[in-house]
Image (cartoon, rainbow, N blue to C red):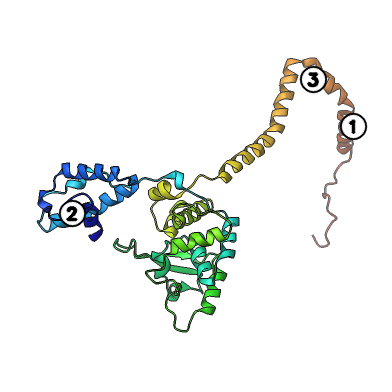
Amino acid sequence: MNRARSYLLEVFPADKPLRDFIEGDAEDWQQAIIRAGRAENTIRKAVGRIRQFFTAAKRRGLVMSNPFEVLPATVRANHSRFHFVSRDDAQRVLDACPDVEWRLIFSLARYGGLRCPSEMLALTWQDVDWDRNRIRVPSPKTERHEGKASRMIPLFPEPHPILMDALEVAEDGAEHVVSRYRSASANLRTQMHRIIRKAGLEPCPKVFQNLRSTRETELAEQFPIHVVCKWIGNSQPVAAEHYLQLTDEHFERSVADGEHHKAAQNPAQQAHAQLRTVKNNPNAAHAKTSANTGVCNTLRDDAQSCEMAQVPMGGLEPPTWGL
């Protein structure tokens, strides 16, 4: 609620009573924030928080209505900020990581699809089921929804050896998988950008979001989408709008599949062409038939020879004693 209040204080005085807010105030607030240069999705997120603030106030009888309900709060996908992190680039980043915990953070984001930092820092060693090759992922972001406090994902082969390395160097009695970077002052995104630049690459926007997006796009090529959404922890509409990417590989594969289909069609096309030739030029078909007469006569002579060779009544098998 403090975040919603801070958004309101950017435009309105602190002594403005909540009951005095009307829909016109909400529209004035929106225009002021736009003039301040805020991005559209940033404004929509702020509207969502302010809506929650006024909804809570309405439940307590402090206001009669929610004036910010007139403003859109649904965050739209910005596909221009999508970036698919290839496996080659991922390996370069892993090689540039300063220690095993950073390798684990990156690997669990790129190949496990974990949210960072919330899910990454909530993960404990007890959540790792080595026998069944599964990981229980606590999800602080969705825990307020029934049945969404955690989810199960496979212990994918890519982060598996890194997770084992991290377990070997973990202190005795360590609870959390990521222990060195749990401080509130540790800005994982800023440090991730430094590591990416060290790898000789340029950080993409929303780096951890794009790592999750990359993994969901990759998994959707191999498994049913409802399974993938269970693993990543989102819904199919959210996945389609905010996560699944159109990549260069899709275009390249479509061209390759087209060439394969074209090659498979050639024999059929040749057969159709020959049939058209026969229909259009019966003399050519007669000439071709005459050329094959010798072969046909030979086959006919062989058939006659088979007819002359009578099969005995007992059949082809030799007689069996006692039968």
Q: Which residue is mark 1?
A: 298
Residue closer to the observer: 134 or 50:
50
Is disc 3 placed on a helix, strand or loop? helix
Is disc 2 placed on a helix, strand or loop? helix
Residue closer to the observer: 274 or 138:
138
Tag 1: Cα neighbours inside 10 Å, few (<14), some, or many (≥20)? few
Q: Earlier in the sequence, mark 3 or mark 2?
A: 2
Q: Earlier in the sequence, mark 1 or mark 3?
A: 3
Q: Earlier in the sequence, mark 2 or mark 1?
A: 2
Decide if residue 78 is on the left or right side of residue 276.
left
Q: Which residue is mark 3?
A: 285
Looking at the picture, does residue 215 appear above or below residue 121?
Answer: above
Residue 55 marker: 2
Under mark 3, the amino acid is Ala
Cα separation between marks 1 and 3? 20 Å
Spot occupied by residue 192 in the image (x, y as percentages of width and height): 48, 62
